Amino acid sequence: MPLSPLPDLILRPLVANALCEDLGRAGDITTDAIIPPDMQSRAKLNARQTGILAGLDLARLAFQLFDPTVIFTPLKQDGEAIRTGDSLAQVEGAARSLLSAERVALNFLCHLSGIASETHKLVEAVKPHKARICCTRKTTPGLRAIEKYAVKAGGGSNHRFGLDDAVLIKDNHIVVAGSIKNAVERAQSAVGHLVKVEIEVDTLAQLDEALALLSAMPIDAVLLDNMQPAQLKLAVEKVAGRLTVEASGGITLESVAAIAATGVDVISVGGITHSAPILDIGLDIVGDQ
């Protein structure tokens, strides 16, 4: 499926807040002191590392919210593999505008490209198995929508976006409810028929408890938390295709292929959003107009 861009309506407040944070109370006093207001410039956003691109629309908005007359011409697309030295976009306009919006544009672009690149590594590592790489809710507060977008740019899939779009019964829910059965019964009685229900289990015994409910209660997925590959394989055999099987907990690039080989359907990885290093991208002025 082609990557669908996020609407500017979602992106604009994030970029506007970032620009206001950077400009502070007096604007860019360095650039305003050094650069004449009528000077025009052209610049390129250039990759300084190899990876997967994400965040071009945020970079565009950083320049154009600061100065609507800036012309932003993308040379690559989000989700595209890029190499060191590739030019990703050209930006033309007032030199002051290019320099003042530069850091905000790069912060978004580098961060999201880093997420996309880390996701892509995991996606490649699990081939040719059926498992999909999925993100979690372990995102930067306020940036969840764009970080989950970057996961998709890297070839991954999105888990739930928040607490309101799926039921995920976790260990503490089970402790408070008293049992998996109690938790599932209460969830099923409270939510609509279109809301999926997933149960997190830590042991094969808990999995057996959940599977015993299937004849009486609809359950859509089971999350196998912090299980080793041998346990995961047994769990997949027990489920026998009746539920979506998700593996989570301590997933690394080194371990993900072995986990995928167990036959799980989804591998969720918090690290692709909360710990992905940036992809180094810079802005270079290429000449005055």
Image (cartoon, helix red, strand yellow):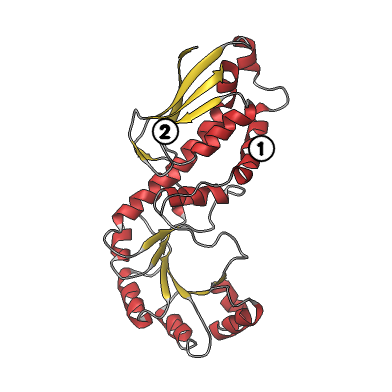
Q: Secondary structure at mark 1?
A: helix
**Vertical position of residue 140 compared to residue 96: above or below:** below
**Vertical position of residue 271 compared to residue 39: above or below:** below
Mark 2 Cα-neighbour bin, 10 Å: few <14, some 14–19, many ≥20: some
x then y, percent, for residue 237: 32, 80
**Disc ID at residue 171:** none
The N terminus sits in image quarter = bottom left
Label 1, on which residue?
17
Q: Contact (CB < 8 A) between labels 1 and 2?
A: no
User: Is residue 253 something one can see in this rendering?
Assistant: no
Camera-nearest residue between 70 and 127: 70
In the image: residue 113, left or right of residue 57: left
**Vertical position of residue 31 compared to residue 196: above or below:** above
* Cα gap from disc 1 to disc 2, whole angstroms: 23 Å
Residue located 56% across and 21% down the image = 99
**Vertical position of residue 138 compared to residue 190: above or below:** above
x then y, percent, for residue 198: 51, 74
Which quadrant of the structure image shows residue 174?
bottom right
Q: Secondary structure at mark 2?
A: loop
Residue located 50% across and 50% down the image = 149
Q: Amino acid at mark 1?
A: Asn
User: Is residue 266 something one can see in this rendering?
Assistant: yes
**Of marks 1 and 2, which one's residue comes earlier in the chain?**
1
In the image: residue 196, left or right of residue 237: right
x then y, percent, for residue 252: 36, 55
x then y, percent, for residue 246: 42, 69
Label 2, on which residue?
280
Q: Residue furthest right?
A: 25
Which quadrant of the structure image shows residue 76?
top left
Q: Residue furthest left?
A: 128
Camera-nearest residue between 214 and 170: 214
